[in-house]
Amino acid sequence: MNLALTVLEITAPVFLLALVGFTWVKLGFEYRTDFVTRLAMTLAVPCLIFTALMQTSLDKAALGHFMLAALLGHGILAVAGEILCRSAGLDRQTFLAPFIFGNTGNIGIPLSLFAFGDAGLGYAVVMLAVSAILSFTYGIYLVAGHSAGSKAIREPMVWATLLGGLFLWQDWQTPPFLTNTLSLVGQMAVPLMLITLGTAVARLTPGRTGTAVALSLVKFVVSAATGWGLAVAFGLDGTAAGVLILQLATPVAVTAYLLAEKFKADSQAVAGLVVVSTLMAALLLPLLLGLVLEM
């Protein structure tokens, strides 16, 4: 009973804030997604990443092991997704990238923060950085047929990660007035990301629902098993293991739909994956979190 209550306390804020965004759009209120997304990804999230890395008390070696596990996790999912697309006759351009990359930002960071506190946030921003860099390079290559490495270099999140990593490595700190300012801006990131997720899901028109249900379930099982296996193989501590498992198991990100729309893949099928996997996550992630907390 206590475990169930703990899981509810952790996961409820994540999905309730997403529900706020969903309801906001359904009631017909204006929500300028482009503006809010740009504000979050250009300002709030980079500030969150930088301050989380600069102020973390996590061991540098532990963060390094976690980063390697995160990279390997995405590699394993890429191989598994390739095999699945070939064996099931699914269009690789449409389905492979959504299978590999989860919503490590909008859902993964809040969930890791609520479940494991500041230590969880430290690992979560590393996972977000790994996922973002791979998405802007290999992910775009899968959908568009060419890489966009230059776009990754221009992303504020990438520079925030590099700068935060440098400050962590050198044990540097910004002046208190600047740290407080950056922390305050970073605190916007979590509610903005969650509410925007809800508005985006509300506006999507899902397609190929049957395929979306099957693929979302397979993605969740394979991702969670991959995270669990890597956590054991790398000997990660409870917090690092929990974040790795939860982050890899997050549902398909809305950015997957935007890329499919931009590069002429089957965007309606990807929209179906986003909606279905997000709804399934509301049921499956609390169950997975319960198992993780008992590790």
Image (cartoon, rainbow, N blue to C red):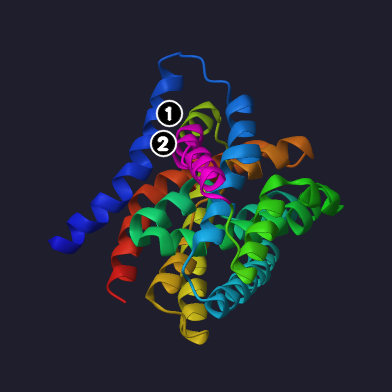
Nearer to me, 252 or 216 = 252
* Residue 166 falls left or right of residue 245: right
Q: Residue at x 31, y 60 (%)?
A: 287
The amino acid type found where label 2 is placed reads Ala
* Residue 96 falls left or right of residue 188: right
Q: Which mark is residue 150?
A: none
State whether residue 121 appears in this view.
Answer: yes
Q: Residue at x 55, y 30 (%)?
A: 204
Q: Residue at x 42, y 58 (%)?
A: 112
For the C terminus, the quadrant is bottom left
Label 2, on which residue?
18
Q: Kindly indicate whether the residue at mark 1 contacts the one at mark 2 (C-beta within 8 angstroms).
A: yes
Reply yes or no: does residue 125 show up in magenta: no
- Label 1, residues with CA under 10 Å away: few <14, some 14-19, many ≥20: many
Where residue 119 appears, as percent x and y from the top left, is: 42, 64
Say above or below: 84 vs 252.
below
Label 1, on which residue?
22
Task: Give the SS element for disc 1.
Answer: helix
Say above or below: 65 vs 23.
below
State whether residue 219 appears in this view.
Answer: no
Say above or below: 278 vs 250.
above
Where residue 80 appears, as percent x and y from the top left, is: 63, 70
Reply yes or no: does residue 186 show up in magenta: yes
Nearer to me, 266 or 139 = 139
* Residue 81 falls left or right of residue 193: right
Which region shows up in magenta?
175-197
The amino acid type found where label 1 is placed reads Phe
Quote the CA–CA distance across marks 2 and 1: 6 Å
Task: Give the SS element for disc 2.
Answer: helix
| Figure label count | 2
Q: Quadrant of residue 102?
A: bottom right
Where residue 6 appears, as percent x and y from the top left, is: 22, 57
